[in-house]
Image (cartoon, rainbow, N blue to C red):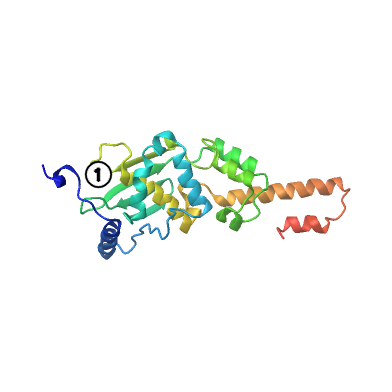
Amino acid sequence: MAYSDQYPEYVSVAEKREKARKQIENLKKKNPNLAPIIIEGKAIATTWWGKAWNKNLEIYADYSNRISRGRSYVRNGAVVDLKIETGVVRALVQGSERKPYEIVINISPLSNEKRASILSLCNHKIDGLAELVEGNFPKELEEIFTLKGKGLFPTDKEIKFSCSCYDWAEMCKHVTAALYGIGARFDEDPTLFFKLRNIDFEVFLKKTIEQKMQSLLENSDKKSRRMLDDKDVFELFGV
């Protein structure tokens, strides 16, 4: 038996990327709105939200054993399209066949109980939209947001997926490539995380402002109706 009959033909990384690039060009002729995942450097994700998404996937045993299968795929440009909507991600991943595989990933919405718990724990710790989006918030909020099973990120039980390929594995490499692609997409637009989980991120800011106002009003009462000092004014307007 020949070597080529026992093992698949070796394809270099450069060849895989070139194949994906050509596929993207062809698909864009029919679909100008195609949104491929392009990884420029070694890291799949570089922002806080992107890295936190990928790290969350890797903390679950079933995922950690299988998810590495998709890393090379996403790095090589195989995720030729990925769009995030409320509660669902639709992707096209180029595999060994001529036509890309279709992937659908459904994410359960954040429960009202979790939402209320996280909001109460935020306790006016977020000062502005930019701070929330950029992930530049106190360490304690990072721990709250990423707490396994209780934070903002979905558990493995809250992620359902399907792929049009013939792989017998429940989680094929095309699905895992798309899962990593989601993290890379958050690098481009972190607000998509809130859209995916059906969270109004402005609620976090509104809650923060309300708590801050309430705190200032309570302090002003303790001062026997004295005028707010400079420090309080600065806090009130986030200066």
Count of numbered circles on the image: 1
Q: Residue 113's spot in the image, x, y percent?
A: 56, 35
The quadrant in which the C terminus is found is bottom right
Residue name at image x 60 percent, y 37 percent: 117
The quadrant in which the N terminus is found is top left
Determine the image quadrant of residue 76: bottom left
Q: Residue 128's spot in the image, x, y percent?
A: 63, 56
Q: Nearer the viewer, residue 48 or 112?
A: 48
Vertical relation: 211 (above or below) 33: above
Residue name at image x 54 percent, y 36 percent: 150
Q: Nearer the viewer, residue 138 or 90?
A: 138
Q: Residue 208's spot in the image, x, y percent?
A: 66, 49
Report whether 237 appears left or right of 2.
Answer: right
Report whether 111 appears left or right of 67.
Answer: right
- Amino acid at circle 1: Cys
Q: Circle 1 sits in a helix, a strand or a loop, which is it?
A: loop
Q: In this orientation, does residue 59 appear? A: yes
Q: Residue 204's spot in the image, x, y percent?
A: 60, 48
Q: Which residue is mark 1?
A: 165
Assess disc 1: are there few (<14), some (14-19) or many (≥20) residues with their C-alpha within 10 Å of its C-alpha. Answer: some
Report whether 219 appears left or right of 208.
Answer: right
Q: In this orientation, does residue 198 appear? A: no
Determine the image quadrant of residue 7: top left
Residue name at image x 50 percent, y 42 percent: 153
Determine the image quadrant of residue 64: top left
Residue name at image x 39 percent, y 51 percent: 181
Q: Nearer the viewer, residue 22 or 224?
A: 22
